[in-house]
Image: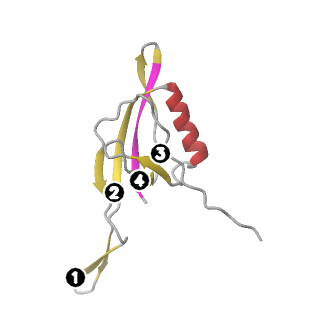
Amino acid sequence: MSTSTIQPYPYWPDMHGCDIVGIQRGYLDSTISTPFENGMSQTRPRFPRVRRSFVVPYRYVSPADRGALDDFIRNSVLGSSGIFIWIDPETAEEIPVRFSPGKCPQITEAGWVSQTVVHSFNVELEEV
């Protein structure tokens, strides 16, 4: 008889020294609506709780942190399919999230700082 253990979700990589300013916080619409013939509609919640969404801008990301992010996306969460733990930098709350559908980070070269290339990207997250 085989026993399986539940693997914990991976943690978002620690981005040392990058700039995170202007996090956008919102809520996902969890309403299901059923229209009726007489023009009225009935609504109900899709989920038992309201889920949150986040858009997190990362600026001045070092090459080492960019490599850690690349490894995380390719090997830990397999693109936008996996769940992971993101720690809110404002509240230190550990939140299980996934990338918004079709919204894996697009990393751009942002320039040079102290003779080192730096990158920037936005991360769109949805609470699970």
- State the residue position of label 2: 52
Element assignment for label 4: strand
Residues at badges 4 and 2 in contact (C-beta under 8 Å)? Answer: yes
Of callouts 1 and 2, which one flags the residue occurring earlier in the amino acid sequence?
1
Task: Identify the residue at horizontal 36%, vertical 72% (top origin).
Answer: 48
Question: Is 122 included in the stretch rendered in magenta?
Answer: yes
Name the front one of labels 1 and 2: 2
Name the front one of labels 3 and 2: 2
Q: Amino acid at mark 2?
A: Arg
Dot 3: within a 10 Å radius of its alpha carbon, few (fewer than 14), some, or many (20 or more) residues?
A: some
Quadrant showing the C terminus: bottom left
Give the magenta part as a residue range. 117-127
Name the front one of labels 4 and 1: 4
Q: Amino acid at mark 3?
A: Cys
Query: How far is disc 3 from disc 2 in space, using C-alphas?
Result: 17 Å
Of callouts 4 and 1, which one flags the residue occurring earlier in the amino acid sequence?
1
